[in-house]
Amino acid sequence: MLGEGILKGLAETARNFFGSYVSKDRLTTIQFPEERAPRIEASRNFPFLVYDGTDPMAGLRCVSCLICEKECPPKCIFIEKSTDKKPDAVGKPQFYPSKFNIDVSVCMSCQICVEVCPFDAIKMDNAFELSATSRFDALLFDKQQLAKPNEYYHEIHPTEASEVDAALAAARAKAAPKPPPPPAAPTTETPAL
Amino acid sequence: MTPDTIDQIFVITKHWLLGYVPSALQPIVSAILSVVPILVVFPLLFAITTVLERKGLGRIQNRYGPNRVGPYGFSQPIADGIKSLTKEDVIPRSADQVVHFLAPLLLVLAAFLGYAILPIGRNMVIVNLNAGLLYFFAIGSMVELAVFMAGWSSRSKYSLLGAMRAVAQMISYEIPLVLASVVIIMATGSLSTVAIVEQQAHYTYSLPHWFVFTPWGFAGFLLFMVAATAESNRSPFDLPEGESEIIAGYYIEYSGFKFALFFLGEYLGMFATSGLAITLFLGGWSAPFSFLTWVPSYLWFFLKLLVLICVFIWIRGTLPRLRQDQLMNLAWKFMLPMTLINIFTAALWHFMPAGILRWIACTALLVIPCIALSRGLKQGKKLQVRTYRFAE
Amino acid sequence: MTVIFLILAAITIAGTAAAMSLRSAIHCILALTIGLVGLAALYLLLGAQFVGFTQILVYVGAVAILAVFAIMMTQGPGKTIQPILSTNWPAGVLVATAVFAILAWAIHSTPAHSTPTQPDVSVNQIGAALMHHYVLPLEIMGLLLTAALIGAVILAMPEKKEPQ
Amino acid sequence: MNGYLLLSALLFSIGLAGALTRRNAILVLIGIELMLNAANLNLIAFWRYGPNPAALTGIMFTIFSISVAAAEAAVGLGIILAVHRHTRTTDLDQMNSMKG
């Protein structure tokens, strides 16, 4: 019939128009600041340093082996090794980074640093609201800003965090009986969650 | 406050204000008093329509319209207004300064002049010309010149292309527009819009005598609305400002307030032509049913105007843009013959005795050529299945 | 009454004089439209409403756009710098002033008589006159316009290149 | 009355001057258009101030003259375009060869 296509089109848009007021599932837009999209587990943004226990500086897993600094494609990680040592996650005394800077404006969140880190010290965060006023120093995150507790890691990447903790617990168990026969000094057992 | 006083509230206030004016200045002040409300009301309607349009289009596409600025986004036009006022007005160096400056002014002037003969309410018309319709189409034809001036003076290929497309489209759709309204002039026997509305304001067992309820009136109304959409460069006919092909057509080199003036001119043109459509076909300010006549007359006019605007937005959300040749074919090969046939059916309607036979004859006389024409026009274009050739 | 007439006369003369003297052709056409609108206003002043609006519709709406299209199609790119006046332009101006002098003298010498009543003519009377008394010229006008329409199209159509 | 006649005489002479002196063919056509308009003004002036305004002769004559002028403008521009297609110029001084 003549003009059938136009009428069908008009009917379709009318259905959309009135449907959007009636059934809420038609409107898929999420009003960003008020409503938030459900966080997808594998989403990643910029790296952060994981620490165990409560004191961020003491519990840092990073032993400043500088592999991630070498591997980072845009070269946005800067580490300064410390002179003294402190016990790391497994209890072995290791160096620790006295200065650990990541230039977030340069980082392309490629996750290579996470893959190459032998000590699971650096993981990918998914907080994206990091806008700052000045372009240079405000986006250069130092050790304090990067360090985040293990619980936070569990919160954002639960499956991955539990695998990492299981591996760490196994490493600690394996490392604990190896010390020489004199009774092993009770190393402060970090509560493996 | 009897319903009649509410209906005539504006006319009474005007005469009351005129009482204070010395008789020497009487004509000038009365002219100002009747023009100023139009200059205030219709730009306000323009502001509301921009919000309605963006929210309507949004809802049609299953998303919210603007809802950030003000409650439900209704102070968005104020934000747009401020934005367009504060934007820097860039004039291209090679542009022709005088003509570049005059084009938007002429466009808005022509758009506003069109309201002089629109009867908004019972005896609420600025000037009752007895050649009212001819005045409206004369003013309407000045818009093309303004569009051409805009396109030519900005000296850029895109704007010239857009201007040429716009002028070609507006000229070829002005003829069906005028011929579609000739039908009403034949039926009422007068060119004055007030007389046309007077004739439509009667009722038989509570149904109004609007011209849209006659076969030739309904066909005329459809043809008039299609031509009006093309005349104001809107929805399926917005080829002159086809963003995808020629960026923004004739007002590409305008920014800031002049750009807003173009939009104001376009929307006012749309309101003027749909206002005329209401006056000619939908009975101007007359109530749809006899028992509703206590409602003030100007309310009916603006209610019908809002309905027509929503239909414009609805069509804009649905129909895709026409190509230039389809546009021209529709105007010259379909609309022109249909309007001529419509005039013939109106004459037949006039001379045949009232009754069901007259209805059947006229509707047949309209529907059969319409189907034959569209079948014939479709014959030419053998629409084969679309084949794609991908690069090897 | 004469004040309005003087203003409108000034607008019309300014528009037409500019139309005949400006350098760029499109500016001439735009100046011409101002002159023609002034003329239409003069018709309204004289009480011939129908003619005034027809004048705007026909001239400003159609003829001006037609002339502008013609100019766009014939004018080459860029500003043509060749002189705008033809070679023997003084002769033209002389003839024009002579004609004006004779007309002015003729008008001046005729006794001024004017009927003060403003004949208000309604569109119905014009329509009736067109349909009853002047129906033959109306039909011929229709014929002439169609002939002009077809003629202009044929003239402007590019000829098919016949094989030499 | 004399004012209108003087004005139309002036318009006529401006149109004549334009038609005679301008080089561009389209502007000559515009000049002729102007002369026609001057004549129309005369007709309406005489109708308004003439002895028998009810006879509507002036208005009828002007309506027909406007439509003739429109037809003439269309055909004139058609001719100019056709000439332009052959000689590539609209300059009247160069169209002096009758070869065509």
Image (cartoon, rainbow, N blue to C red):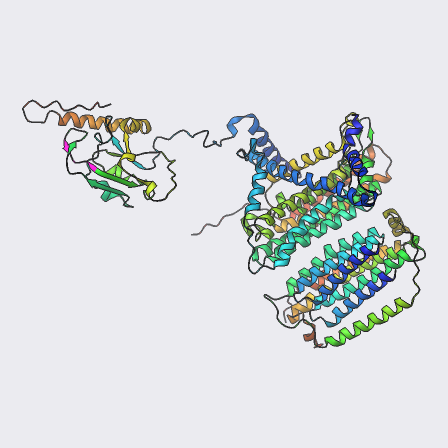
- Seen at 88% across and 66% down, the residue is C107
Picture quarter containing residue B304?
A: top right
In percent of width and height, residue A12 lies at: 59, 33
Picture quarter containing residue A71?
A: top left
- Seen at 58% across and 39% down, the residue is B78
Q: Is A45 displayed left or right of C71 in the figure?
A: left
Q: Is residue C70 above or below residue B107?
A: below
In percent of width and height, residue B2 lies at: 80, 25
- Seen at 86% across and 55% down, the residue is D59
Which quadrant is the N terminus of chain B positioned in? Answer: top right
In percent of width and height, residue A5 lies at: 62, 38
Q: Residue furthest right?
A: D51
Residue C76 visible? The answer is yes
Picture quarter containing residue D85?
A: bottom right
Q: Is residue B320 above or below residue C159?
A: above
Q: Is B20 displayed left or right of B389 in the figure?
A: right
Tell me how many marks there are: 0
Tell whether position A96 is magenta.
yes
Residue A108 visible? The answer is no
Q: Is B252 displayed left or right of B301 in the figure?
A: left
Q: Is residue C108 above or below residue A118?
A: below
From which residue to which does the magenta span run?
A92-97
